[in-house]
Image (cartoon, rainbow, N blue to C red):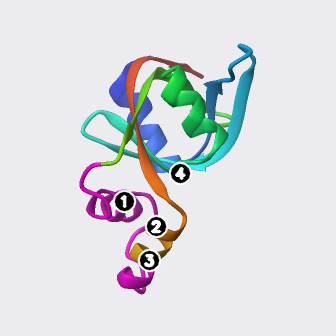
């Protein structure tokens, strides 16, 4: 499957399962909202989560979207901390649209210690 097709499917579906690698090599799977931009997937998460810790140690990830049809996107992730909260606002707009109170959103992102995961796809597959 073409990566651009997979990213378009992800942007349309937004809800997915993010898989990262635990320290013992087992998979860690969590539901997330994702947005696609400039050939990458974006996910917001608190920096203290298992997924963030896993990605800091091992950047390999896979995201799956949908059931029938479905798409999986495998690649590497990096934790983005520069230019927050502007980058988190951009992610939110792509994933959910306009927020009713951006100041409240910014405060929540700081309180929750949010970072942005930026996933660079290496391959895509699905049905």
State the residue position of label 1: 88
Magenta-colored span = 82-104
- The image quadrant of residue 54 is top right
Instruction: Give the overall secondary structure of the magenta segment.
Output: helix
Q: In the rendered structure, are the residues bearing label 3 and label 2 in contact, judged by CB atoms less than 8 Å apart?
A: yes
- In-image side of 125 versus 122 (left or right): right
Total numbered labels placed on residues in the image: 4
Q: Which mark is residue 45?
A: 4
Q: In the rendered structure, are the residues bearing label 2 and label 1 in contact, judged by CB atoms less than 8 Å apart?
A: yes
Between circles 3 and 1, the one closer to the viewer is 3
**CA separation, marks 3 and 1?**
12 Å
Where is 100 relative to 88, above or below?
A: below
- At mark 2, the secondary structure is helix
Query: Which is more toward the observer, 62 or 82?
Result: 82
State the residue position of label 2: 109
State the residue position of label 3: 107
Q: Which tag, 4 or 1, sits closer to the chain's start?
A: 4
Mark 4 neighbour density, 10 Å: few (under 14) some (14–19) many (20 or more): many
**CA separation, marks 4 and 3?**
15 Å
Q: Look at the image and tell me whether residue 73 can be seen.
A: no
Where is 73 relative to 10, above or below?
A: above
Q: Which tag, 2 or 1, sits closer to the chain's start?
A: 1
- At mark 4, the secondary structure is strand
Q: Which tag, 4 or 2, sits closer to the chain's start?
A: 4
Where is 34 relative to 64, above or below?
A: below
Between circles 4 and 3, the one closer to the viewer is 3
Q: Which tag, 4 or 3, sits closer to the chain's start?
A: 4
**CA separation, marks 4 and 1?**
10 Å
Residue 119 place in picture, x, y as percent: 41, 32
Residue 109 within the magenta-colored segment of the rendering: no
């Amino acid at each position: 499957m073409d990566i651009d097709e997979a990213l378009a499917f992800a942007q349309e579906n937004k809800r997915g399962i993010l898989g990262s690698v635990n320290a013992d090599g087992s998979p860690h799977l969590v539901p997330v909202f994702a947005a696609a931009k400039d050939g990458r997937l974006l996910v917001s998460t608190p920096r203290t989560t298992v997924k963030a810790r896993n990605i800091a140690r091992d950047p390999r990830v896979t995201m799956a979207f949908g059931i029938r049809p479905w798409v999986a996107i495998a690649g590497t992730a990096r934790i983005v901390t520069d230019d927050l909260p502007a980058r988190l606002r951009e992610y939110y707009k792509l994933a959910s649209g306009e927020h009713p109170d951006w100041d409240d959103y910014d405060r929540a992102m700081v309180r929750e210690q949010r970072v942005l995961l930026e996933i660079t796809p290496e391959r895509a597959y699905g049905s």
